[in-house]
Image (spheres, helix red, strand yellow):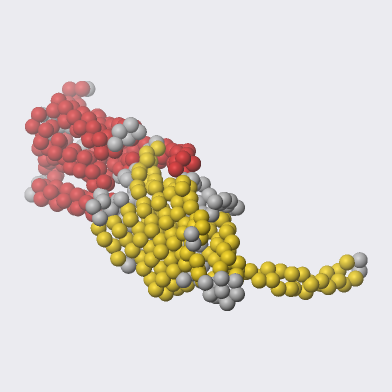
Amino acid sequence: MIKQIVAIVLIYLCTSLAWMILGGTILKRTDCSDCAMGERVGQLWGTAQSQVAPGFFYETEQTTRVTREQDGKTITEIVPTKVRHDLLMDASKVAVDLSLEHRQKGLLWYPTYKVDFDGNYVITNPDSDKKLIYLEFFLPASEAIYDDLKIKIGNREVIKIDPVDNRITEPIEIEGHGNRTVSISYKSRGLNDWHYLFGRSVNQVRNFDLTMKTDFDDIDFPQGSISPASKKKLDRGWQLVWSYENLLTGYSIGMTMPKKLNPGPWVSEVTFFAPVSLFLFYFLLFMSTTIKGLKVHPMNYFFIGAAFFSFHLLMAYLVDHIQVEQAFLISAIVSVALVVSYMRLVVSNRFAFVEVGIAQLIYLVLFSYTFFFEKFTGLVITILCIATLFVVMQATGRIDWSDVFERRARKSTPAVEAGS
């Protein structure tokens, strides 16, 4: 009996080692896929976008006294310099439409999106004299395309837009105490997140209104962003509104695109936890066969472990070609069929289809299925372990284990003598 237990433990440890190697292989493939495909997706579709609110400023000249040494003499010069004066916008009205489109590359899904941006800003000349005020607008990403980019200053549309270092600067002439409305719109594409920043640091914002529409229901706001003041459910997606009269903040407005289940990381996680499911199955199988006096050789445990391993091995390579849910179903059917069809030859049809079949459905299929629900996986596994312990304790509470092990020893003795 002791030799049998030691052999089963060795088989379990070897199978667990194989799972660790397989899980590491999946992670390696996933990382390689992410390095190669992630860069390719970024090149084709764009990167995460952070749109900074436009800035407005005017410049004044002042003189600065500069002293320098030349040929042993001290020379003092008066150098004219320009001083920048930033202006606060009177009002901002922004509309953003986000359309989600997931794209699969290798073992990963990438949440790409289309963004339709339209911003209207009001700026006022604070002085009584006519002043040349500059618009400063930063494009949200350098690796992106911008379709139908338009900048209108009052009724005048800027014909030539020439960004320098991702920055567009346009002069605006405004009469004393006059104001101008500046409209900026474009269509672009991005990846993972979209942000709207009020500035580069803590900024004051007056009469601000941003309306965001999404075509997806699973909305999430990135860390360090402001929650909307109101939201309304649409037929498809949400309408979110951020509205403030006078705000001082260093936070941003943002949206994180909902992510699909990534096959590579998901399969690797299921694979790394597979030894837990096999341990519970082996434990229940050993107890059941010991109580009923059924003879199951360690080699039988070896083939059962191989059939369990086939579930993860087949799924690891099926997810390259089909949806992860489909790969899970096919792999589960194959693995259960291997174990049940084998155990009916080893023991009996009833034991194979009822005890073994149900146990494998619980400890392999249901156990692995819980990983589709990330928040409940740990709880379900804990409940499963406790339930297994409860069932075995209740079933074996009145058993004289000394008698069981002696009986198994007596049954194995004739076989040993016959072999000798």
Left or right for 190, reference 13: right
- Front residue of 331 and 153: 153
Q: Residue at x 39, y 36 (%)?
A: 106
Left or right for 255, reference 166: left
Q: Position of residue 324 (x, y in %)?
A: 29, 38
Q: Position of residue 84 (x, y in %)?
A: 62, 69
Left or right for 49, reference 319: right
Q: Is residue 66 above or below residue 136?
A: below
- Front residue of 254 and 3: 254
Q: Quadrant of residue 295?
A: top left
Is residue 99 something one can see in this rendering? Answer: yes
Question: Which quadrant would the N terminus be assigned to in this image?
Answer: top left
Left or right for 242, reference 390: right
- Front residue of 228 and 133: 133
Q: Residue at x 15, y 35 (%)?
A: 357
Q: Residue at x 75, y 73 (%)?
A: 64
Question: Which quadrant would the C terminus be assigned to in this image?
Answer: top left
